[in-house]
Amino acid sequence: MTRRPRRSSLSLVVAGLTTAACGARAPLVLRSGPQTSSHAERRAPGVVPEPTSTLPPPRPEASPERGLVVLRAPANVGRAIDAVRAFFRAVESGDSGKLDALIHPLAWVTTGSQGRLLARSFWRTRLSRLDYRSSDGRLAFQPSEVDVYRAGAPPPPRASGKPIRLAPAGDDVVVRVRIASPAPGQTRLFGDEVVFLLHPAESGYQITEMAEDFQLP
């Protein structure tokens, strides 16, 4: 009588798993934790994000007792001097359009006899009455004849001894230009000095006020 060999327990287990796999219809699904909307929001458990701090607005100056402050870099004073130099070039060329670009629409000019006038209209009238183009460069801007001061600095003395009443604030700049006396027989085209108050603008500095002891003929 022939004895049939017994199947081992391991063979039965493998056969059972194979049969179950072949007959299974449902796919194997691996589930993960909740999805986050972005990588930036993922953080370790128990970690509290720090609140976003807002810096104070920049200031031109501040004392140490104020705590956290943001100081604003001072504006370039050289650009204010460039605006004054461009002003004199526009006057010498008689170009009122260039003057309008340098002078703020609401800028005032204070004269010794005519009081306070709108600067743009005053200079248009001035260019129509006086011929600055005949100066042949004698009115050219001379850096050695210029005084500059900013807010908090004492103003330079005026030739007439009168105080300069144009007070700069913040990044404003005051520029005083001393004018040489004309030669005998020549028409006087300026006062002894012209004082400018300038305010920083997008394209540089713009004249916001002027002072000059000068009377139109």
Image (cartoon, grey):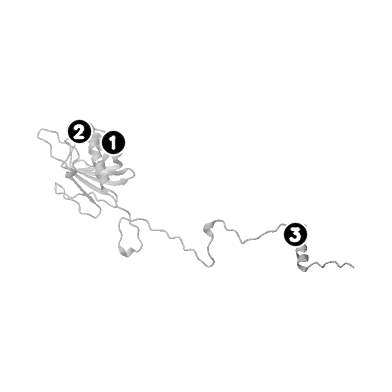
* Residue of label 3: 21
Count of residue discs? 3
* SS state under label 2: helix
* Residue of label 1: 98
For the residues labelled 2 and 3, say whether their Cβ atoms are less than 8 Å apart. no
Distance in Å between CA atoms under marks 2 and 3: 104 Å
Q: At which x and y percent is residue 162?
A: 16, 49
Q: Which of disc 3 and disc 2 is earlier in sequence?
A: 3
Q: Which of disc 1 and disc 3 is earlier in sequence?
A: 3
Q: Quadrant of residue 82?
A: top left
Q: At which x and y percent is residue 174?
A: 23, 48
Q: Identify the residue at horizontal 30%, vertical 44% (top origin).
A: 204
Q: Nearer the viewer, residue 51 or 206?
A: 51
Q: Identify the residue at horizontal 77%, vertical 65% (top origin).
A: 11
Whether residue 41 appears in this view of the structure is yes
* SS state under label 1: helix
3 or 1: mark nearer the eye:
3
Q: Amino acid at mark 1?
A: Lys
Q: At which x and y percent is residue 78?
A: 25, 46
Q: Amino acid at mark 2?
A: Tyr
Which quarter of the rendering shows the C terminus?
top left
* Residue of label 2: 132
Q: Which of disc 2 and disc 1 is earlier in sequence?
A: 1
Residue sitting at the far front: 1
Which quarter of the rendering shows the N terminus?
bottom right
Q: Nearer the viewer, residue 85 or 163?
A: 85
Distance in Å between CA atoms under marks 1 and 2: 15 Å
Callout 2 crowding tier (Cα within 10 Å): few <14, some 14–19, many ≥20: many
